[in-house]
Amino acid sequence: MRGLCVSLELVILQDSKLKFEVSAMPDIRKHRGAHPEDRKLFAEAQLPILQTAVGDLSWLLSHDYTMKGALKLVGDRYSLPERQRLAVSRGACSDQGKQRRAATRVGAKDLGGEDLIVDGFNIIITVEAALSGGILIDCRDGCIRDLSSVHGSYRSVNETDQAIHLIGTALEDLKPASVAWVLDRPISNSGRLAKRIRDLATQLGRNWSVGVIFNPDAEIIGSRQVVISSDSHVLDQSERWFNFNRYLIEKELAESWLIELS
């Protein structure tokens, strides 16, 4: 026996992409902050090699390499540990992806009177990370992404209500006609998070709807609303999207720990 802690992983495939991990160790985190090694892994001296790795990975993706294969090539070449590889993968994108996202991105001034659809977990987790001192990545496509992972289970943290409030206030400042939040039903506690969003909407008198559905990516991509997300898969297939994370972080959370990997 290698230790007192035994983990059990149950892998279930849903729509060819959902992975659930069940662990004997409960998630007891109160913050979505930095990993203990982040100060070392993302110190100023590390950034040039990580930026070079993002450039190399983006070149490979632009020439039709798969993310998995390309990331292994780049990660092995620069001897990157797992967490640095995650940052590089989130910071990179192909030339084609970068160009398409730039062409479909709309500005804040264009959102008045528009209907917005929010990729709930995607946006909330990034803002939670920013509020709790987690590392944020300034990516090649202009998005700001975090290094958190849900893996089928979500647990609210001390910053959750503040994150929802900040997001809601920023959304209302854009003066949309409506805001539809979408959450992943297969992720645990999605129903509880939906209730928190609805309660806050009622408290603040906001015109929000909150849906908890099995395939939110398809719902978001297929909608005619302006998309609020930083998910690369979603952005590459959306007709219009707004770079909300950058807008909010620059407006309200400028002191966040943001590293440039673009």
Image: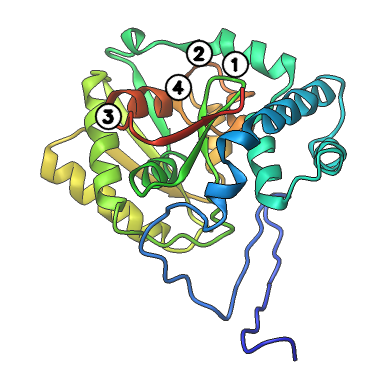
Can you give x and y, in whole percent of width and height, for residue 24 in the image? Answer: 57, 81
Query: What kind of residue is marked 4?
Result: Asn
Task: Rate crowding at label 4 as few (under 14), some (14 to 19) or many (20 or more) other CA atoms within 10 Å.
Answer: many
Find the distance from the CA under tag 2 to the CA under tag 3. 21 Å
Q: Residue at x 29, y 58 (%)?
A: 158
Whichever of labels 2 and 3 marks the residue nearer the N terminus, that label is 2
Find the distance from the CA under tag 4 to the CA under tag 3. 15 Å
Tell me: residue 98, above or below residue 119: above
Which of the labelled discs sits on residue 179, or is there none?
none
Find the distance from the CA under tag 4 to the CA under tag 1. 10 Å
Find the distance from the CA under tag 1 to the CA under tag 3. 24 Å
Query: What kind of residue is marked 2?
Result: Arg
Can you give x and y, in whole percent of width and height, for residue 58 in the image? Answer: 76, 24
Does the residue at mark 1 contact the one at mark 2 (Cβ under 8 Å)? yes
Whichever of labels 4 and 2 marks the residue nearer the N terminus, that label is 2
Find the distance from the CA under tag 1 to the CA under tag 2. 6 Å
- Say which element carries label 1: helix
Q: Residue at x 33, y 13 (%)?
A: 111
Whichever of labels 4 and 1 marks the residue nearer the N terminus, that label is 1
Number of numbered discs on residues = 4
Q: Quadrant of residue 60?
A: top right
The residue under label 4 is 243
